[in-house]
Image (cartoon, rainbow, N blue to C red):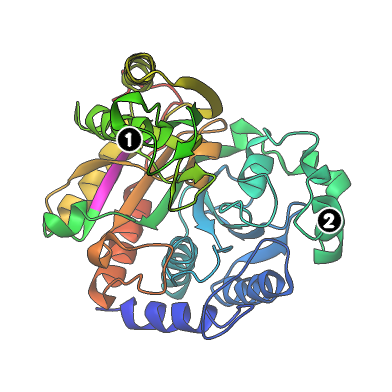
Amino acid sequence: MTVGPALMARLDDFARHSADWPALTRLYLTREHRAAADQLLAWMREAGMAAHLDAAGTVVGRYEGTTPGLPALLLGSHIDTVRNAGKYDGNLGVLAAVAAVAELNRRGERLPYAIEVLGFGDEEGVRFPVTLTGSRAVAGTIAPDAVAARDRDGIALGDALAEFGGDPDGLGTVARDPAAVLGFVEVHIEQGPVLESRRLPLGIVTAINGASRYAVTVTGQAGHAGTVPMALRHDPLAAAAEMVLAVETAGGAEPDLVATVGRIEAKPGAVNVVPGQATFTIDLRSPRDDSRKAAAAGLLDTLAAIAARRGVALDIQPTHDAPAAHCHPGLMRQLGQAVARAGIIPHHLPSGAGHDAMALAALCPMAMLFVRCAGGVSHNPAESITVEDADLAVTVLLDFLRHFEPVPLAEGPRP
């Protein structure tokens, strides 16, 4: 190992920028976020980069190529966290990229392109009812009204951004010229158990899953738990239970499709009352939009049939729909070659979670390198990676950078 121990020590140190240390909570545009940004700026400059904070609060470090002003390959991830987070989600990708550039700088290596490391904010979308603010600003796709979003204390995103040191009126200036960007590569923990189950330290992401979400309300007839005979009931919670199993069945119908009921509630919620209403959520994801949409249509038909058979009313409201973001075949190929040169069997897998890379896909070719995490645990203090895997991730990233060849935005069929 060469950089792994130092990288893990930095990740530990970085986690101290938290609202509730020793737990880790670092929300977008808070004092803790600003302290982390300042630390990252210092580390970027130490690694040989020119560094600044852009209008959206993203930390940007640039390492010039053989001549100044060359198009740049973008690296990085996010430095905001969920509440009571783990140390590695997002942070690993940023600090691993800094470590790779620091090694190039230590050796005096300049590449035939520039490298920019980006430490985004608002990937998690925890503080404000928006998400991916930093990466969408870079991609030029940020919503014009994003600055009007307010947190639970009534603070507008624009006001918080100005206090942070950003420029809410200058978000449009952050958008990059596609001609000056060669691509975006994000190193990230897997946030799932697949690599660990295959005893592989790294994996190449094929796509970031598209997602469909729904709010479901089932309305029946409330009644006394002791006096309404079973055959005469119109129990919305019992109907919802059957529907939840139908969601599970739909999610297991084909590879890479997943379906989840994350929340369910019965009203009035008394132990001795047959509920009058039940509500639950559906989250359906797949790296293939056609499969996801077909599964959603079939599932909604199944839920309607269950409701009709049980004599309950059904209302289904779509709450979110996002297409899949496919990784670029050329970048996947080059990452796979770097992984293979490290003596690891290249394994390809989709990402079930969202990432900044999905926003950057609107700007340039993008790809992701996953790092194994213990038990697939993420968004939790138990989040864990090994020093060996951290070292290997930087080694592979460095090898990828040294062999990198620009790719066209469109290249062949996407997986």
| Secondary structure that dominates the magenta span | strand
| Amino acid type indicated by mark 2 | Gly
Seen at 27% across and 60% down, the residue is 376
- The residue beneath circle 2 is 154
- Let me know if residue 369 is in the magenta part: no
User: x and y percent of residue 164 in the render?
Assistant: 80, 65
| Amino acid type indicated by mark 1 | Val
| Distance in Å between CA atoms under marks 2 and 1 | 36 Å
* Span colored in magenta: 203-208
Above or below, 174 relative to 304 = below
**Does residue 203 appear in this view?**
yes
Seen at 31% across and 70% down, the residue is 390
Q: Say which mark, if any, is on residue 105.
A: none
Closer to us: 131 or 294: 294
**Does residue 412 appear in this view?**
no
Q: If the image is split into quadrants, where does the N terminus sit?
A: bottom left
